Amino acid sequence: MNNHEIDYKLYGDDMQFVEVELDPSETVVAEAGSLMMMTDNIRMETIFGDGSTSTSGGLMNKLMGAGKRLLTGESLFMTTFTNTGSGKRHVYFAAPYPGKIIPIDLSVWNGKIICQKDAFLAAAKGVSVGIEFQRKIATGFFGGEGFIMQKLEGDGMAFIHAGGTIHRHNLQPGETLRVDTGCLVAMTRDVDYNIEMVSGVKTALFGGEGLFLATLRGPGTVWVQSLPFSRLASRVFAAAPARKGGGGKSNDEGGIGGLFDLFNK
C-alpha cells in the first residue's frame, strides 16, 4: 500500500466521532479544527496541502497541492498526527455538525471517490485530497456544489461526514437517480453526473425545491444525505427571532414580560 494502514472505530449515532488507531510511525491527516482528543506520544504538525506522496517532491509541488485546496474553499493547511511512541496510540476526530461519518476504503472503490467540497474529515497519510472539475458548464454553475468538487485518491482509509441520515444507493448500468443538489454527498468515479432543470414553470417557481436537480446515471455508487447543513442553517436562521436594539430580548417574547412591555411603551 502507498498509504498508511490505519484502524478505526466509530462512536455515537447522530453526532458521531471516529477513533483512529495508529501503530508506531503511522500518520493520519485531518482538516484543521476536526480534532476531538488524542492520547500521549502523538505529534501534531501543520503542513501545506494533504501530505500525500505526490506533494512531497519539492516546495513548488507542495504549494500547488495546497493551492488546489483554496479552489474548493478549504484552508491552505492541514494537520498531521503521527504516533511517535512504541505502542498503539489513538486520535479522535468529530464532525462539525450533527450527522454521520462515512468510512471509505479507497482500495475498494478503484482508488477514487468524488465528494462535495466540505465533506472531507480525515484520512490515512498518502491519500490525495484534490479537486474534481465538472465537465459540463451547467453542472458547475447550477450544481449547488459549484464548478469544483473534491476528489479523494489513493488506496487507504478516508473519512467523510454529512448531515442527517446517510443512504448509499447502488446504481445499475443505465439507472438514473435524481437528487436535490445539496443532498449529494459522494459518488464513485464511474457515475455520470449532470444537472437538469425542474420541468414546469409552476413547479420551478413555487415548488420550494429549487430550479435544478442532480441527475446521477449508473453504473456506480452514490451517497446521499437527508439533512444538508445549508438546509439546517437556513431553517435555524428563519426561526431565529428578531432582536431589539440593545435590549437583547426577542420581539416575539411573550408571557408576563411581554405584558409589562405594553405599559412601558
Image (cartoon, rainbow, N blue to C red):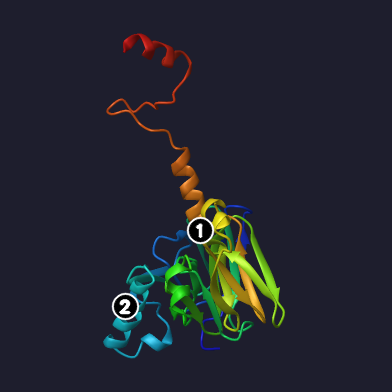
Residue 263 x, y percent position in the rendering: 35, 8
Residue 228 x, y percent position in the rendering: 53, 57
Query: What crowding class fits label 1: few (fewer than 14 Cα within 10 Å), some (14-19), or many (20 or more)?
Result: many
- Quarter of the N terminus within the rendering: bottom right
- 128 lies above or below 251: below
- The residue under label 2 is which amino acid type? Gly
Query: Dot 2 lies on which element?
Result: helix
- 211 lies above or below 24: above
Residue corresponding to mark 1: 94
- The residue under label 1 is which amino acid type? Ala
Quadrant of residue 69 within the rendered picture: bottom left
Quadrant of residue 64 within the rendered picture: bottom left
- Of all residues, the one furthest to the right in this rendering is 172
Q: Nearer the viewer, residue 130 or 137?
A: 137
Q: How many marks?
A: 2
Residue 90 x, y percent position in the rendering: 52, 66
Q: CA distance from mark 1 to mark 2?
A: 25 Å
Q: Nearer the viewer, residue 21 or 76?
A: 76
Quadrant of residue 200 within the rendered picture: bottom right
- Quarter of the C terminus within the rendering: top left
Instruction: Report the disc number at residue 67.
Output: 2
- Of all residues, the one furthest to the top in this rendering is 263
Q: Residue at x 34, y 75 (%)?
A: 47
The mark lying in front, picked from 1 and 2, is 2
